[in-house]
Amino acid sequence: MVLFLRQTLSRNKLVELLASRPSASKHLINYLTSINELSAVVDILSGLGRYNEAGLVLYKQALLASKGTQLDSRASRLKTVLSQSQMLRHPDAPYVIGKQDLKF
């Protein structure tokens, strides 16, 4: 049912509906994560105001995208993710950015 609503409703209406039904949002986010639609997960989490989780999903997405690539390329992708607004809202963002700068 939630997948049908996702396809037919506008983003704002879907987020409004999911905000009032945490169980449905949890199931949709788990499903989208399992099929690796991480950008859709980030969009929904951001719409729900769950910026910390959205930042972590972005970080995971960057790690998956750079798997098997050169170290410089991976570092560049991670720096891009860390500088995005969802990640910067996390209280530990400065520590993660500092650690990432030290590693690469």
Image: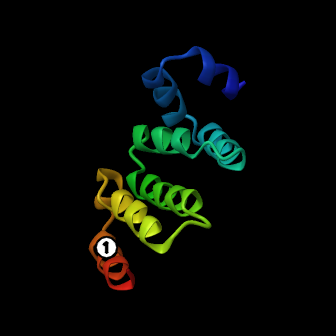
Say which of 42 and 69 sits in front: 69
The structure's colour scheme is rainbow
**Displayed quadrant of residue 69:** bottom right
Q: Residue at x 64, y 42 (%)?
A: 23
Position of 57 relative to 79 (above/below): above
Position of 63 relative to 2 (above/below): below
Position of 80 relative to 33 (above/below): below
Q: Residue at x 50, y 58 (%)?
A: 62
Q: Position of residue 43 (x, y in %)?
A: 46, 39
Say which of 84 and 11 sits in front: 84
- Image quadrant holding the N terminus, namely top right
Q: Secondary structure at mark 1?
A: helix
Q: Position of residue 31 (x, y in %)?
A: 70, 43
Q: Position of residue 61 (x, y in %)?
A: 53, 55
Q: Position of residue 32 (x, y in %)?
A: 65, 42
Identify the amino acid type marked 1. Answer: Ile
Q: Please give left or right for residue 6 compared with residue 62 in the image.
A: right
Q: Please give left or right for residue 3 compared with residue 11 in the image.
A: right
Say which of 26 and 100 sits in front: 100
Given the current orientation, which residue lies at the most extreme top position? 8
Residue occupied by mark 1:
97
Q: Please give left or right for residue 38 compared with residue 76 in the image.
A: right
Position of 99 relative to 29 (above/below): below
- Image quadrant holding the C terminus, namely bottom left
Q: Please give left or right for residue 24 compared with residue 71 in the image.
A: right
Given the current orientation, which residue lies at the most extreme bottom position? 102
Q: Residue at x 35, y 82 (%)?
A: 99
**Displayed quadrant of residue 6:** top right
Q: Residue at x 69, y 20 (%)?
A: 4
